[in-house]
Amino acid sequence: MFCGGGSAGHVIPNIALCEQLKNEFDLCYIGTDGIERDLCRDSGVPFYTFDGVKLVRGKVLCNLSIPVKLHKSVKECMEILNQTKPDLLFCKGGYVSYPPAVAAAKMGIPVLTHESDVSLGLANKLIAGKCRRVLTAFPNTAVKIKNGIYTGTPIRRELFGRDRIMAKRAFGCDLRPTVLVFGGGSGSKAINDCLRGCITELCRKYNILHVCGKGNVVYSSLYGYKQLEFSDDMGEVYACADYAVSRCGANAANELIALKIPTLFIPLENGASRGDQIDNALYFYERGLCKILRECDMTPASLQGAIDELISDKKLKTALKENTFKRGNERIIQEIKCALNESFN
């Protein structure tokens, strides 16, 4: 049984693993009636719903009812686990993972969890002690956890080996460099606004493929500027991109590095997150694998300048080409099978 949700970043890696495991195991998914249900709808994996409980950071009064709601959530999860009788629960973090992990531990069901960021998220911090192993996307995360194992991160197979010429043709890009700009699943107003403040100058030199988020497309007849609300086929989007500007959520960051796309990361700042995106960006920056523009320093002029620097940075392209970063799917599947064998012996 898989669990994880609250954002696409906690679901898409699970779907990547499900695709590889579905012919070998009976699979199911437990989550809330949120984005995880929508994303899992077409996977063919049976989905079970419970009422989740989310901590609202910085708002004490909103969290007063959490203990009562959490008790109810754990009870619901125990009923689902008793019905489905999984041999293993695989968690992908986010608040959606906590009740199923607690329920599984109470019932003696082995639990594995995976952390995609450099720093552990709150849910994974809370459930780490209940897990057989905590799998991590980054090696320096695993060494800080008693039961941590570095595996890499799950990445969808369909992102690789796509036809670049066909992708550029599909998005109407000419022979100039194509820069992909996106700000996460729902877009980023800060990035969108700054990009549009310098888009005329950028399109004199580059194609700009802008995944701006639902409801954020604006009218433009500017040559070289292509807008999308979102894409159901990120493999085609990535194939079109010679360069990228992105937030630094773990999944997007790992995908861009694995695909060797030179990227300017604009991480969410601490006030809008727990600081995980800054940690992720610094990890890659310290290894010469990306460039960073802090949001507090971002203006249309600084964004334009940073994109120009990204495209002219030959050392970055060489570092990415020589980097041996790989998908973690096979190692994670190996750990899943190992945990299953341990529980049967």
Image (cartoon, rainbow, N blue to C red):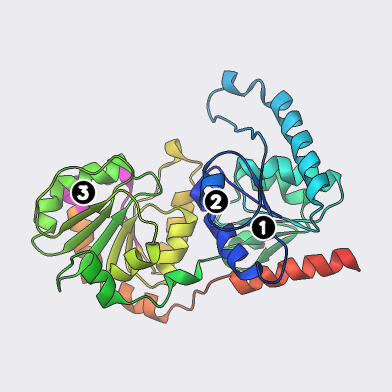
Q: Earlier in the sequence, mark 2 or mark 3?
A: 2
Q: Mark 2 falls on what kind of element?
A: loop
Q: Earlier in the sequence, mark 3 or mark 1?
A: 1
Q: Is residue 325 magenta?
A: no
Residue range corresponding to the magenta coloring: 291-303
Q: Mark 3 falls on what kind of element?
A: helix
Q: Mark 1 falls on what kind of element?
A: loop
Q: Which mark is residue 144?
A: 1
Query: Hey, what amino acid is under mark 3?
Result: Leu
Query: What is the count of numbered marks?
Result: 3
Q: Which residue position holds label 2?
A: 41
Q: Which residue position holds label 3?
A: 195
Do the CB atoms of the residues marked 2 and 3 lie less than 8 Å apart? no
Residue 130 versus residue 291 in the image, above or below: above
Do the CB atoms of the residues marked 3 and 1 lie less than 8 Å apart? no
Tell me what residue is drawn at x 50 percent, y 66 percent.
Answer: 156
Query: Hey, what amino acid is under mark 2?
Result: Arg
